[in-house]
Structures are given as C-alpha cells and as structure tokens.
Amino acid sequence: MTTRLRGHLIRTLLTVGAMTALVLGAAPSTSAAAPTQPAPTITAVDFTGIVALSNCSGSVVRTPNSQPGDPALVMSNGHCVRLLAAGEVLQNQASTRTFTLLNANGTSLGTLRANRLLYATMTNTDVSIYRLTITYAQLQQQFGSRALDLSTVHPTAGTAITVVSGFHRATYPCDIDGFAFRLREDRWTWQDSVRYTAACHTIPGTSGSPVLDNDTGQVVAINNTLNENAQRCTLDNPCEVDQAGNVTIRPNIGYAQETFYIAACITTASRIDLTRPGCQLPG
C-alpha cells in the first residue's frame, strides 16, 4: 500500500520514526527502513486542498453536486484509520481527527477538524471519508482555500498524473500505466486498481494522497500501495491477479484505487448513501 500497508499502514499507525520502517502509501504499506529516494520533482500541480494526517496524506474533496453550505469532506485511505479486516466497513462514526491544511506552496494554513468518520474500508478499495466541522464556504472564508473536484469518469491509461502528498509536502509525477483486474496484498483484495509507471515511486507517508489528472486537476484515484521487496501478494508487496487467476509481480511499482464512483455515493449535506445508482462502495 502506499503508506504501504504495513509500512504505510503500520507506519501509518506508528510514529514518524517507526513509520519510516513501514508503509502502504500506501497508502498502504511499508517495509523496514525505506531506501533513500531522490527528491520528487515538483510539477504545475500544487498543494491547494491537500491535507496532512498524523500518519498519512489526504485531500479536501467535493462532488459536482456539493453546495457551499455542505460540510466539507476529507478523503484518505482506509488503512490510515487502522488496519481493517477484510470485509470490514465502518460507517457514520464519531471522530475528532485533525488535519493540517496546506496552501498552494505546501505551507500550513491551519487545522481542520472532523466530527464524523462517514466511511472507511479496505475491501475492494482502500478509502476513508471524514466530515469536517466547517462547510466548503467556510473553508474559503476562513482559510482562502478550496476543495479538489472528484472526477466522475473512469481514468484512462496514458494519462499524466501527480500523486500529491501532504505528509511529505512532495509531489510524485508519472503516468497511468494501466489497470490491475485484482490487486492482492496480504488479506486484502482491491478491484480495478490504477498502476503507475515507474516514475511514481511513492514512499511511507504518501498513503491517502490524491492522484490528480494533470490536465484537469481533478482527483482520479487515491494513492494506496507499492511492491517494495519483489515478494508475492504479501504485506507491502501487492501482486496483480488477472481474470484467469494468473499472478504478476511488479517490483517497485505503485498503485492507487479509483475514485470515479465515490461522488455517486455522496448526497445532500455531505451524507453517504450506498444505495444510490452508480455507488460502488461496499456496504
């Protein structure tokens, strides 16, 4: 995962020092000490709407139907809440989680607070959605910031993208290489996952980062994991499984979970309704 499950995940649950030995990026995963990576290249994409969690990255997001008076939403990974069991779904739970909101240059604008964890799972996808104590209009009024738009269209292979990490105040530009029919890591399985080209070598703490389409600036996926040690389907080492059951291992390649159907799950006043047409989040 790109906090890379254990790495990203475990580092996700530990301190920054301990986190350096874990990840999923995963957002998911992490291994023991991650190798030193070259400084990420900064692209035209900036940090507007990006947040840093204590153990992960995330973003303030809105749907095409979101209204200024609706409570603002923050999206990250499910494993950034905790390592959820396969098949486990959390819904509408009280939360006091805080997020550091960044400006375009990656400098802190202040602290955002959640009052509800609306949804979290690591089944079929790896996502968490928090409801904040302020509205989209208040986000603009108090911080001079805005939310990122969720794309409602399935991403396309070859698209130029950037993974934007609030935790590291860093960007990772690359392209969408293709899609994994099934992505398996330890006890979790994700569907139709985005596969990056090799340039997006994410590191612990990038879990939950939004994946932005460089042309539209919209969120097309959420950074999730990376195969760290060339192992087969183990923690921090996801493998691809095709429709015939064949397994492929791609060392040092990262993945993300698509988000195009999430907007369909969000209704008025930033509520989640899993029964709405087009919503594919598991219940």
Image: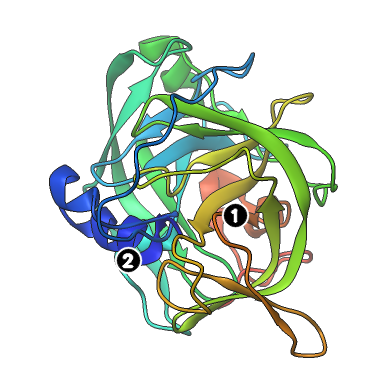
Task: Find the residue positioned furthest to the bottom.
Answer: 245
Q: In the drawing, what numbered circle is on residue 6?
A: 2
Residue 55 numbered mark, or none? none
Q: Secondary structure at mark 1?
A: loop
The C terminus lies in quadrant: bottom right
Left or right of 85: which side holds 22?
Answer: left
Q: In the rendered view, how is the structure colored?
A: rainbow
Q: Image height check: is 85 above or below 235?
A: below
Foreground residue among 231 and 122:
231
**Can see residue 81?**
no
User: In this view of the protein, which residue sits in the foreground, 215 or 254?
Assistant: 254
The residue that appears at 30% across and 43% down in the rendered structure is: 114
* Three-letter residue code for mark 1: Ile
Rendering coords of residue 253 (x, y %): 59, 54
Which of disc 2 and disc 1 is earlier in sequence?
2
On screen, residue 177 versus residue 118, left or right, reads right
* Residue 166 seen in render: yes
Residue 258 position (above or below residue 161) = below
Callout 1 touching callout 2 (CB < 8 Å): no
Q: Is residue 254 above or below residue 238?
A: above
Residue beneath disc 1: 253
Q: Secondary structure at mark 2?
A: helix
